[in-house]
Image (cartoon, rainbow, N blue to C red):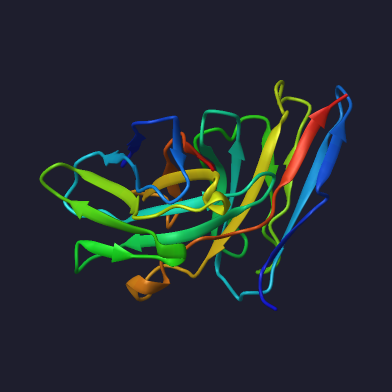
Amino acid sequence: DGGITQSPKYLFRKEGQNVTLSCEQNLNHDAMYWYRQDPGQGLRLIYYSQIVNDFQKGDIAEGYSVSREKKESFPLTVTSAQKNPTAFYLCASSRGPGLAEHQETQYFGPGTRLLVL
Amino acid sequence: AQSVTQLDSQVPVFEEAPVELRCNYSSSVSVYLFWYVQYPNQGLQLLLKYLSGSTLVKGINGFEAEFNKSQTSFHLRKPSVHISDTAEYFCAVKRGNSGYALNFGKGTSLLVTP
């Protein structure tokens, strides 16, 4: 079955530690996204990538980094510079730009919950 | 950039009653609007979307929404809710300059009770 997988489901970070959240998709989508979800605040865009080896900052990129070396993978690293990392992190993907309107849909993974020890 | 505002943070409703979840969007020439549902500790699932054409959009699980350009609204409706509809609902709009990334509202928690 095609879809998006995120791992781990729960992740614990110690102070000063960098942690990496995995996101993999087998939908053959060009574009991938990372969102952060906090209670009562909806989802906020961290980073997005429209094509391999290219990515752009979203609204809250400070303290995060990404890479896009493969079409199917878009890992997110939460660095020690992110002072309030506790949140639910959601990865999404969609087909690339320039396509038919009906293909403008983002598909979401099951999420990773990051907690600070 | 495009934005949406969900007018209710919580909506309690009895089973089999109708429900409306309200969403207003910022005005623009063209707009792509979406409603997603999230069950506890899960990702988001698309309910329906408006890209163009008919202003009444039908989605999954019996939900529908109406795009109203004059009132800049995209309210979600269901004529008869079930206990299983209890979830968080998010209205979203395509951002103008970030590929197909979305701007989300803060969510509406729908609680259906017997």
Which residue is drawn at the image coordinates 72% and 21% (left, top)?
A: A83
Q: Reply above or below: A81 against B92.
A: above
**Image quadrant where residue A26 sits:** bottom right
Q: Residue furthest left?
A: B70
Residue B70 visible in rendering? yes
Which residue is drawn at the image coordinates 42% and 72% (left, top)?
A: A103
Left or right placement of residue B79 versus residue B85 in this view = left
Q: Quadrant of the N terminus of chain A?
A: bottom right
Left or right placement of residue B55 versus residue A39 in this view = left
Q: In which quarter of the image is the C terminus of chain A?
A: top right
Percent position of residue B62, x then y: 41, 63
Which residue is drawn at the image coordinates 19% and 43% (left, top)?
A: B72
Residue B51 visible in rendering? no
Percent position of residue B111, x then y: 52, 38
Q: Reply above or below: B81 against A80.
A: below
**Image quadrant where residue B50 sits:** bottom left
Q: Residue furthest front?
A: B114
